[in-house]
Image: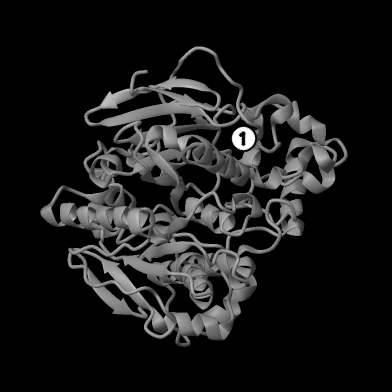
Amino acid sequence: MSALIVETAYGKVMGEQNGEICVWKGIPYAKPPVGSLRFRAPKTPFAWGDVRDATKFSPVALQTPSEVMKFLGSELEETNEDCLYLNIWTPGADNKLRPVMVWVHGGAFAAGSGSSSMYDGTSFASEGDVVVVTFNYRLGVFGFLHVGDAGGDEFVGSGNCGILDQVATLQWVKDNIANFGGDPNRVTVFGESAGAMSIGVLLASPSAKGLFHQAILQSGAAANVHSTSKAEKVTNRFLELLDIEPGNLNKLKEIPAEQLIKKAASLPYMSLVPVIDGVTLLQHPEQVLAEGGANDISILIGTNKDEYRLFSYFDPRWEKGDEKEITSIFEQTFGSSWEGISQKFPKGEKLTQTMYDELLTMKVFRLPAIRLAEHQVKQKAPVWMYRFDWESTVFEGKLKSCHALEIPFFWNTNEKPGMEKFTGEDTSEKRNLARNMHQAWINFAHNGNPNTPDLPEWPAYDLENRSVLLFNNENSLAHDPNSEERRSWDKAEIHA
C-alpha cells in the first residue's frame, strides 16, 4: 500500500506529499449533522468502499462572515452544514509513535475553521516531528443552541454539540492516528480564544477523559459557559425571532440552515457558548478543576498583553465618541459590576479606550487563565504560564499585542500570504520570536515541558513566585506580572 493511502476504521484515504510531509484533508470523523441529525450528538461516520480522495479541505461550518475573522485571514470559500471533517499533517504514515497535536480553532464559538492558512501544520510536522490534526466543529446555533430541556431526549446535548464534535475528533484520533505515524497515548490539545475556552470544557467533560494528556490554552480558560437557565433565555429569544412556539421545536430541523444563521446574527455577541447541561458538562469547569478533575494533565497557558485591543480598535465609537458615549460604553459592557469596577479609578479621571482594553483583557482573558493555573497548581498538576508582549507594527502600532497576534508565531506561519497585514513586515526579530515560540510548543508536545535552550529558564507556575515567560524581541521571565490588577480584582470579587 502506498504511504499516501492509509487505512482508517471507516475506509482508506489517499493524501498527498508536500515536500517531506504527508497531508490528508477532509477526512470525515462523523456523519453529516443534517436532517434528523441536526442538533444531535455526532454519530460515527459512514464507511466507504473505494479509496477516498483526501487532498482537498472540506467546507467549513456555517457562519456569518465577520470583519475581524476576515482580517485574521479566515477563508470562507465554502460553508456547509455538512462540515465535520479533519485534516492531518505528518512526517510519515509509518510505525513511529510521534506526539500528536490536535488544534481547536477559535472564533467566539460562532466563526472560524480548521483549514485557515494560519493553521498549516507543515512546520510542526517537519521541524517538530509531530503529527498535527485540525478540524471543523459546529458553530453558533448548530453547535451551542440549548434545546435539550424543552425538546426532550431527541435534543439531549444540543447546547454542546460543538464540544461533542471535539470529543468525537479526539476519539477518532485515538482510534486511527497510529496509522498516520502518531501516538494515541501522547495527545496534546491546543487552542486559542474559543478554542482554548473549549479545552477548558474538555478538561471538565467526562466524555473527553483519557482522550488527551496535555493541553495548551491560549487566550481562553474555563470560565466561558452558560448555566441552563441562561442558555434557555437565549433559546427562547431565538425561538421568538423565528416565530416558533416552545412546544414545536421540531420546526428547527425543517428551517433552512442559512435562515437559522441569519436570525442568529441578531443575538448578542457570545450568546451561544457551552452549557452546563448535566449531561456533557455536569458542573462549572472551574469547579471541576478545583476538585482535581484534570490533575493528570500538564498545562501550558497564557494570554496576550493587550488582548482586547483587537476588538476595540475596529469599534468606530472610540474614534468619534464624546465623554458621555464613552461612559455609556463602560456602563453597558460591565452592567451591575461597573459601580464596583469604577472605584478602581481616581475620582474624576477621564475614561479612555486604553482603560477599557485593560479592564476587559483582565476580566475576559487574564483572570480566568490565572484561576485555571491556580486550580491546577493546588492539585499539584504541572503548569507553565506565558504572556505574549510583542506588538504588531501595522496601523502605526495601534493594535499593540492584541488578541490572536501570537497565532502565526507559534504555528510558524508568518510567511503565509496576508499575514504581514496583521503582524507587519518581516524582520529578524520576528523570525527569532516565531522560532522560539514554535520550539517551545514542540517541546511541550514531546515532553510536557516548554523549556528550550534559547529561552530563559522557565520554572513551572506556583503560587509563591507566579513565574511567567514574557515572549518579545527579548524574552524574559517575570514574577507575578499584573500582580496589582490581580489582587484588586480578587479583592473586589469581580468574576469573569
Q: Residue furthest left?
A: 428
Q: Residues within 10 Å of mark 1 (few under 14, many from 20)?
A: some
Asked if residue 405 can be seen in this view, the reply is no
Q: Residue 247 vs residue 205: left or right?
A: right
Q: Residue at x 63, y 31 (%)?
A: 44
Q: Residue furthest top?
A: 50
**Amino acid beneath label 1:** Ile
Quarter holding the N terminus is top left
Q: Residue 72 vs residue 241: left or right?
A: left
Quarter holding the C terminus is bottom right
Q: Residue 59 vs residue 280: left or right?
A: left
In depth, the one of 244 and 87 nearer the eye is 87
In depth, the one of 219 and 37 nearer the eye is 37
Q: How many marks?
A: 1
Q: Which image quadrant for residue 415?
A: top left
Residue 242: image x %, image y %? 75, 36
Which residue carries the number 1 mark? Answer: 261
Q: Residue at x 24, y 72 (%)?
A: 457
Label 1: element kind: helix
Residue 477: image x %, image y %? 26, 75
Q: Which image quadrant for residue 331?
A: bottom right
Please say if 380 is above or below 451: below
Q: Residue at x 62, y 43 (%)?
A: 164
